[in-house]
Image: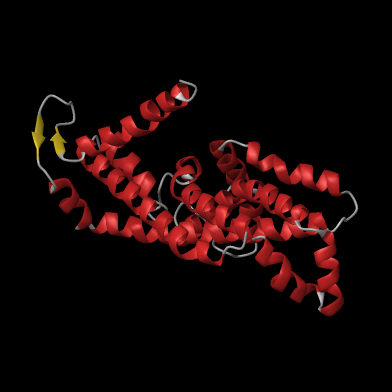
Amino acid sequence: MLVAPQLTITVVFFFWPAAQAIYYSVLRQDPFGLRTEFVWIENFRIILTDPLYLGSIQVTIIFSTAVAMLAMGVALLFAVMADTGIRGTQVYRTLLMWPYAVAPAVAASLWLFIFHPSIGIIGRHLNEMGMLWDYRLNGGQALLLVILASTWKQVSYNFLFFLAGLQAIPKSVIEAASMDAGRARCFWSIVFPLLSPTTFFLVVVNVVYAFFDTFGVIHALTGGGPAKATETLIYKVYTDGVMNLDLGGSSAQSVILMVFVITLTALQFRFIERKVHY
C-alpha cells in the first residue's frame, strides 16, 4: 500500500504509453484515424529499409557520442578545478550549476543569439572575418552547434556528481599518492579509478540524455535541418508522427529506439561495470 502511489504513476506514465506504442506499431491508420489496418511487422520493414531512417541512426550515433564525451570531459575538468580550492570557489560552483536550470528551448535560443549568422555575436564576426558560417545551410555546422548547445546544457549536471565524488575521496589517500607520483599520474592512477562508480552512472545518464532529452534543443535551434543533418531518432519520431501523421510508423520507430536504448544500457552494465570499483 505504501508503494501503490508510485506504482500507479509508473504504470500510467511509463508502462501504459510503452504498451500503446507497441500496439500501434503493428497497425496502419489513415491521417484522420478513421480506418485502421493490422499490418504486423510491415511498419518495421519499411523503416529499416528507409535511407532517411538509416541516416538518422548515423546522426544519432555521432551526436550522442559527442555530447556524452564532451559533457563528461568538460564537467570533470571543472570539478577538478573546483575541488582544488581556487579563489572564489563558491561563486565558481554556483555559476556552473545555473545552466542546468535553463529549459532546453531557452538554451537553444541563447545559442542562437550567439551563433546566428546575422544577429549572433560570434556568428556575425565569423562571417566578417571571411569564414562562411551559416548553420541554417551547412549541415556540419548545424550538427556542431546542436552538439555544443546540448553539451552546455548537461555539463552542470555532470559537474555536481563529479564534484561530490571528488569530495568523497579521503584527502589522506591523495596526499599519500602525491608523495610517490606527480599530480597527473596521481589523478589517473588513484583519483579517477575511485570515481568509477560516479563515471559509470553518468555514462548511462548522459547516453539517455543525448538520445531523448535533447529534442527541445534540436527543435528550437535547427528543426532537424538543414537537409535532415540534425534529425536524430527521437526527432524523426516527432516528424513522422506529429507532422506527417504516420502514427504506425512513428510508433514503430519509438519501439526500435526503446529497444536500442535498453540494449545499449544493458551492455553498459554488462561490460563497463566490470571496471567499476566500489
Colour option used: secondary structure
Q: Is residue 236 left or right of residue 43?
A: right
Instruction: Give 154 or 176, whichever is nearer the viewer.
Output: 176
The quarter of the displayed image where residue 139 is located: bottom left
Instruction: Give 128 or 261, whichever is nearer the viewer.
Output: 261
The quarter of the displayed image where residue 78 is located: bottom right
Whether residue 114 is visible:
no
Q: Is residue 63 above or below residue 183?
A: above
Q: Residue at x 11, y 43 (%)?
A: 40
Count numbered badges in the picture.
0
Q: Residue at x 56, y 61 (%)?
A: 69
Q: Residue furthest front?
A: 1
Location of residue 7 in the rendering, given as x and y in whole percent from the top left corner: 42, 27
Location of residue 189 in the rendering, given as x and y in whole percent from the top left corner: 70, 73
Report the quarter where the C terminus lies: bottom right
Location of residue 165 in the rendering, given as x and y in whole percent from the top left corner: 70, 53
Location of residue 176 in the rendering, given as x and y in whole percent from the top left corner: 84, 70
Whether residue 28 is visible:
yes
Q: Is residue 52 left or right of residue 224?
A: left
Q: Residue at x 53, y 49 (%)?
A: 205
Report the quarter where the N terminus lies: top left
Q: Is residue 113 above or below residue 171?
A: above
Q: Is residue 229 above or below residue 8?
A: below
Q: Is residue 232 left or right of residue 88?
A: left
Q: Residue furthest bottom?
A: 180
